[in-house]
Amino acid sequence: MIKSNILFIQVDQLTALALKAYGNTFCKAPNLDLLAERGVVFESAYCNFPLCAPSRFSMASGQLCSRIGAFDNAAEFPASIPTYAHYLRRLGYRTALSGKMHFIGPDQFHGFETRLTAELYPADFSWVPNWGDEGKRDTNDPRSVTVSGICERSVQIEYDEEVTFKAIRYLYDTARSDDERPFFLQVSYTHPHEPYLCKQAFWDLYEDVEIPLPSVGALPKERHDPHARRLLADFGMLDHAFAEEDIRRSRRAYFGAISYLDRMIGQVLDALAATGAADKTAIVFTSDHGEMLGERGMWFKKHFFEPALRVPLLIAAPWIEPGRVATLASLVDLLPTFVGLAGGDAADAIEPLDGMDLTSLLGDGDSPPNRSVYAEYLAEATVAPIFMIRSGSYKFISSSADPNLLFDLEADPLELENLATKPEHAGLTATFEAEVRAKWDERELTDRILESQRRRRLILGAHKEGAPIRWNHGEAPGDQVPWYRGEGSYNAWAFDYLPRAHPDSPSKTAT
């Protein structure tokens, strides 16, 4: 049997609700629109942890983060845990990664045979939380909203251009190669992650477009749930009201960034076609998590509301009939799905997986009855683990530190009515509570998290003494990759962008 190639395109912080395949009416992303038309759209796909690194570790391993110890953006991803890259290599694939993966720890490959670019974010323990004493963190700055708009260049633009160039070169190099193995190529972008900035040409695409304000505007502090209040405080936004102009500009720039991203993806797909590989390549597209984009007055991610938790998930190949799948899916499904696309059987995995092979749902596949999907939040701006269960039309959010949240997404898609406070839903709430207790040992998990934080803070402090140790892929000793934050902070490079050129500059429309 001739195995198909697999092209896995992953982006950062793209909410499913921003794309036309999920109901958006104005987003200009023709390549993603065409991919959705030619492929299968998973209508209700979720990340398993609304934060970058843990989300990527769960999708890579096919396991929930609590199981593998991936608690936050500074948690080591153990080299002993098999990933989809390991399984695919065992199935005869060459595996390559172009772009960010946010691996933490000395192993920066995790089964990939080749890494084509440097990493974007720190691979050390720089961002380890401290549940005992957290202050304002070096991430998620409110300036993302206030300085949003047009720029000529940014670190993120430069990085994604490099990701695209290296991916295209890999496709052409592979076409010329004598290596007859099929390829698994992951192309992993950082857009449309904040800061909300885009080039003039993509800003101009929305000149005559009425981009609506958030469906649910900023809420007073007392109407936010406790976790939302903690997040807003962590972001420096709790008592801050953004001007309508700032909100409109940020949302327009976010969609401009999606359009820019779509252009990059189109270039990769054009190269795939030019090499003659398109007819024998399955394409999978998703994001690591979503983006609140001002809904409820909230931005970024780290909560379980739909904009931050729902992600696009598209699978397309010439031999796959286009369609839509209503069955609940999540990113832990990717490992078994890649194995399925490669002609393997995920049932042969050496450890229990939390996901399922979604290829079983393509065509006339039967949906599993009453399937649930799960998510966790174990990182900063909380004092205890938070768990999410999506089952049927209901979403349940539970933490020992906070009141329960229960939403009926069919009747209440904006998640405004907490049914957990309603006596008529006491039985359903109790059922979900029992499922949480059965699935997670919160006390044991909390102890592991706190112990891990203490260990990593000690190691981080030790590594700051003497010669620095950072584990960064693509960075030689004494060097600093231009887009990597190095010894500086995230906000130092994230906001180090070149503003819009003079209106008369010929470069203002360059793409």
Image: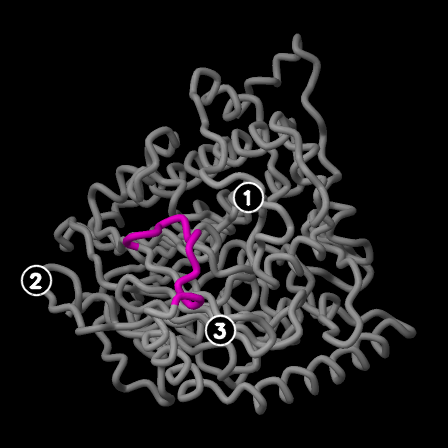
Tell me the kind of residue under disc 1. Answer: Asp
In-image side of 91 versus 319 (left or right)? right
| Above or below, 256 relative to 404 | above
Predominant secondary structure in magenta?
A: loop
Q: Which residue is most to the top?
A: 504
Q: Which residue is mark 1?
A: 160
Residue 310 to residue 22: above or below: below
Q: CA distance from mark 2 to mark 3?
A: 35 Å
| 60 displayed left or right of 148 | left
- Residue at point 17%, 65% (across, down): 361
Comparing 284 with 194, the one in front is 194
Q: Secondary structure at mark 2?
A: loop
Query: Residue visible at 76% across and 83% down?
Result: 454
- Residue 112 visible? The answer is no
Residue 69 at what x, y percent from top left? Answer: 56, 81
- Magenta highlight range: 410-422
Tell me where residue 156 appears, x and y as whole percent.
61, 43
Query: Given contact means CB atoms under 8 Å apart, are the residues at marks 2 and 3 in contact?
Result: no
Q: Residue at x 28, y 74 (%)?
A: 356
Circle 3 residue: 398
Disc marking residue 364: 2
Which quadrant holds residue 51? bottom right
Q: Amino acid at mark 2?
A: Asp
Would you say residue 393 is visible in this rendering? Answer: yes
Specify whether residue 417 is painted magenta. yes
